[in-house]
Image (cartoon, helix red, strand yellow):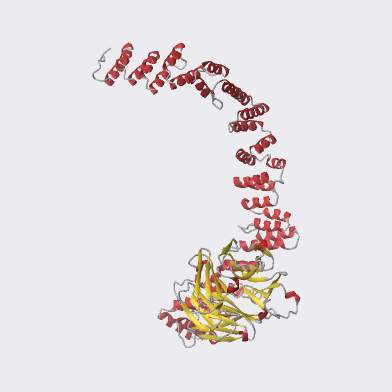
Amino acid sequence: MNNPSLTWNKFDRYFYETNEFYQMEWEDIDLSNYIVSASRFGGLLALILDDSKVIQINSVSIKHRIFIYTSSGVLISQIDYGNKKVKGVGWTLDERLLVVYEDCSVVIYDIFGEIIKTILMAQEKDQELVYRTVVWENGIVILTKKDRLILIESMDDPKIMEYNLPLKLGAVTAMEIILPFFTFSGHTEVLISTLDNKLYVLSEKSDPFVIDLDERIIDLVISPTGKLLAYYTANGGLFVVSTDFEKNYLQFNCNMKQKPRQICWCSGDTVLLNFEKNNLLLMVGPSQSYLQYYYYEPIHLITEVDGTRIITNTKCEFLRKVPEVIVPIFQLGVSSPAAYLYDASEAFSKVSSKGDETIRMILKKSELTVAVDTCLEAAGHSFNPEIQLKLMKAASLGKTYLDGYYHDDFGIMAKDLRVLNQVKAFDIGMCITYTQFKKMGTELLIERLINRKFHYIALKICECLTQSKDRVLVRWACDKVKSSGSDEDILNSIVSKLGGEGGISFASIASVAYSEGKKKLAIKILDYENSASQQVPLLINMEKPERALIKAIESGNADLIYLVLLHMINDPDYNESNLFEIVRNKKIAINLLVKYCKKKDPKFLIKLFSELKQPTKIGLFKIVESYQTDEFNEIVKLRNVSSMAFNSSKKTFFKKITDENIKFLNFQRQLEEKTPLTVIGKSINETLTILIKREYYKEAKKLKKMFSVPNERFWWVKMKALASKHRWKELYQFANNEKSPIGYQPFVDICIQNSVSDQALKYIPKIKDPLTKVKYYLKLKKFELAADVAISQKDQTLLDDIHNRAPKNLKIPHNI
């Protein structure tokens, strides 16, 4: 092959080249009659007839249709959009087609014309029509004929916003957007030029910014980096400014009276203008240098990150600045380490000793590593497979002379080139450069191949680049499910292909089968899903709640079990008897259902217990429920239900205490009817306390007798009640009426607690234990009385202890 530099053109300080990728497959296509929208990164083309032109149509089949082609002109699909009027077309990065219709509707299609989603940018009742629109890779802005500017920044999460529009519709001459990650505000900015030589910058969070210009803008376009704005004026002037409008980089007179069909960017800082007359492509550089290319046919320009794709009626080309890494290898008259290495490799291929001499010369200058790296990178940027191979051989030769060279780079580049050359194949038609491949990433490339149903190619690329194959296999299976054939054949095909793969989401495949109306197939596929969290929700959607509940229980995940149960409870089409039948004999499900119903649906819980023949649980629940109301009749009613439930379950103890409780409630009710007391809801002890405090002794005795209150408990309650009212005399009489069943220490303690030591002294003599008496006397600082007890007990040790504790001025006997 000849030296690639022979086809280069010197422009400004750089070289540019045009490479042909494909001869177009399509026939009878005249691009001058079509509006073309292209997906970036060597992607698909959408063609639609330009209704602004008077065109003689020989075939009715091309009217009201969008044609989708590859970059090689292979037809993918046709979309019939009926009698609507298309106002804008664009592509998302994963090659979903966005079509804006005049009625403010936006339809998202897949590449085969299936509708994915429809979005209404304005209410139908408003009857708004689109005047202008800009479509970009993840959003849309619409200028309506009612002077509204409507925007969606993300098609994945479409939220409609509206910007203030400070001008009248008829004044607009051009419109463009600056994406949020290129703006200071962090919001999408809309640029609108007007007839009165103004440029408006509109943003969601700020007032319009207005720039006065010397000339009227008729077209404008933002650079791929978002840093530069190129605009074309009515006087034929081309201007390039920074997007913050602080710097002017270019002012160029094109000497053209006509408006260019397109303006686009090439390799970052060069502007291309596509003039329909004479099919002129004007290339303008930053230093006002220019080149003119005349084509024999209409062209369409597509800005890429590293150049410009050029589509004509017959071919697909790529115009770019020659990568700097390639120039020193092939530029005539220039010597470089990489060029020497390349020549040495060529010499080796011809069995010439000159090759070894050249490499040792490079090695001597310590330039061999640079030469190897340069040849390796240049191979990636080369389009011609023959040149790629020669550069890879040169790099391979050079690294054999190097110790410790990082060989992984060589392997990575070899794999990348294999992938790029594979997807550039005519039938696939992805003319992706190495720079674009690194920019878009493997994930997006795989997604595009899957969308085009090149599953096998996508799978091989995953294997080549050691990427996960799961996504490819799942999408293949989803497409397989949609195909014709028996359920058994489809299932066998999927299982044989995917059965041995780990991490496959069979649930997503089953979901597609279900949406296709293949319910039996969906259930069979779902049995292969290992993740219950994916199985269960889908089974619910498939209206298979019992199967879903079994899977949820097997997983041991309470949240999943709740999910199924709540679905059955809330589904109006699902009756209770079916639910009870499903949960029967499923202990975990029953326990969780009970837990839920206790908080959220008590009535349903009673039905559940009845169905499960568990009257004891009904009784216990009604007891709990009775404590959640203050209405007396309701409390009694609930506890009567409990009593009957306990009777039914032969729980005699539960029934007895429930009946006692009901009896006590009625006693309290009678008390409240006869007295001003409030006692309902109080315990027996609390009720006794209230009665004694309020001196209803007769009623207190009646309560004690009626409910068999133990004598000890009664004494405790009465003692505390009298003490709390400071009725010390009455307390003393009570203690002396009969022998205390609780002893007299409690009386002493309660008197001390209430700081009435004189009262406490009355009860100490009644205590039998001498040591306890002494303890209390000492606590009350009655040392003489304590000494008397010790002496009476003839306890010298105790007397000595008292003597040591007593103040020195007290005459406490030393000896008994």
- Residue at position x 68%, y 74% in the image: 48
The percent position of residue 807, horizontal first and vertical second, equals 26, 20
Query: In this picture, is 340 found above or below 483?
Result: below
The percent position of residue 697, horizontal first and vertical second, equals 51, 16
Query: In this picture, is 204 found above or below 239?
Result: above
- Which of the two residues, 254 or 654, is positioned nearer the viewer here? 254
The percent position of residue 500, horizontal first and vertical second, equals 64, 58
Can you say which quadrant of the picture contains the N terminus? bottom right
Query: In this picture, is 397 found above or below 482?
Result: below
Residue 146 visible here: yes
Residue 477 visible here: no
The percent position of residue 210, horizontal first and vertical second, equals 50, 71
- Which of the two residues, 36 or 387, is positioned nearer the viewer here? 36
Corner quadrant of residue 582:
top right
Can you say which quadrant of the picture contains the C terminus? top left
Corner quadrant of residue 803:
top left
- Which of the two residues, 304 or 803, is positioned nearer the viewer here? 304
Query: In this picture, is 72 found above or below 9?
Result: above
- Which of the two residues, 779 or 19, is positioned nearer the viewer here? 779
Number of numbered labels in the structure image: 0
